[in-house]
Image (cartoon, rainbow, N blue to C red):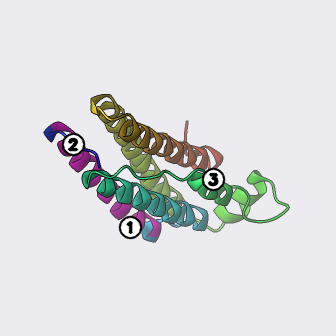
């Protein structure tokens, strides 16, 4: 059991509200996205953010959660070629050809907002990591931050593969 300082509790409360926002955003964005691949990405990210929220809640209770290795890998493998034997370009062309320009613009806005959110949240974890006394708590925060960065990378990769990132 870790005794948290007032500052540590406040930082965790902030992270908790950020994770709750991400879960809400990704669930909504999964419904709003036009491309099936993007819907799946947002659904996976919402699930990952729920794991982060669970960890933050454990920390708020003074418990150091165990961080599972490879949680993020499931999301990344799902982002690879969903159609077998097709290159990313063929995959993109067959999926994108069914989308209107308005659909693509809609998805681009969702991605841009999500990427901005991930950048911001990663930076808040960076600050929190430096404020915690307990090494194990810092390691958990560091693990979550790394996963937030991976979320940003997944969004960036989607945008790049679909011509949305200049």
Closer to us: mark 1 or mark 3?
Answer: 3
The residue singled out by tag 3 in the image is: 73
Picture coordinates of residue 55 (x, y %)?
Answer: 38, 55
Main SS, magenta residues? helix
Labels 3 & 2 near each other (Cβ < 8 A):
no
- Pointer 3: residues within 10 angstroms few (<14), some, or many (20+)? few
Picture coordinates of residue 92 (x, y %)?
Answer: 69, 57
Residue at the location (36% across, 41% down)?
137
Picture coordinates of residue 131 (x, y %)?
Answer: 27, 30
**Looking at the figure, which quarter contains the C terminus?**
top right
Front-lying residue, 108 or 129: 129
Boundaries of the magenta span: 7-30
Closer to us: mark 2 or mark 1?
Answer: 2
Between the residue at mark 2 and the residue at mark 1, the CA separation in whole angstroms equals 33 Å
Q: Which mark is residue 28?
A: 1
Front-lying residue, 115 or 112: 115
Q: Which mark is residue 4?
A: 2
Q: Earlier in the sequence, mark 2 or mark 1?
A: 2
Say whether residue 24 is magenta.
Answer: yes
Quick check: 40 above or below 87? below
Q: Earlier in the sequence, mark 1 or mark 3?
A: 1
- Pointer 2: residues within 10 angstroms few (<14), some, or many (20+)? some
């Amino acid at each position: 059991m870790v005794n948290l300082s007032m500052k540590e509790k406040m930082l965790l409360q902030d992270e908790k509200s950020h994770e709750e926002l991400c879960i809400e955003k990704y669930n909504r964005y999964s419904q709003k996205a036009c491309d099936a691949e993007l819907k799946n990405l947002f659904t996976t990210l919402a699930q990952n953010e729920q794991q982060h929220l669970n960890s933050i809640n454990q920390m708020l209770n003074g418990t150091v959660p165990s961080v599972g290795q490879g949680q993020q890998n499931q999301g990344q493998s799902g982002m690879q070629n969903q159609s077998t034997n097709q290159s990313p370009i063929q995959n993109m062309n067959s999926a994108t050809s069914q989308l209107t320009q308005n659909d693509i613009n809609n998805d681009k806005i969702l991605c841009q907002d999500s990427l901005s959110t991930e950048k911001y949240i990663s930076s808040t974890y960076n600050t929190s990591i430096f404020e915690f006394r307990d090494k194990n708590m810092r390691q958990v925060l560091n693990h979550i931050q790394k996963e937030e960065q991976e979320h940003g990378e997944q969004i960036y990769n989607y945008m790049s593969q679909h011509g949305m990132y200049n």
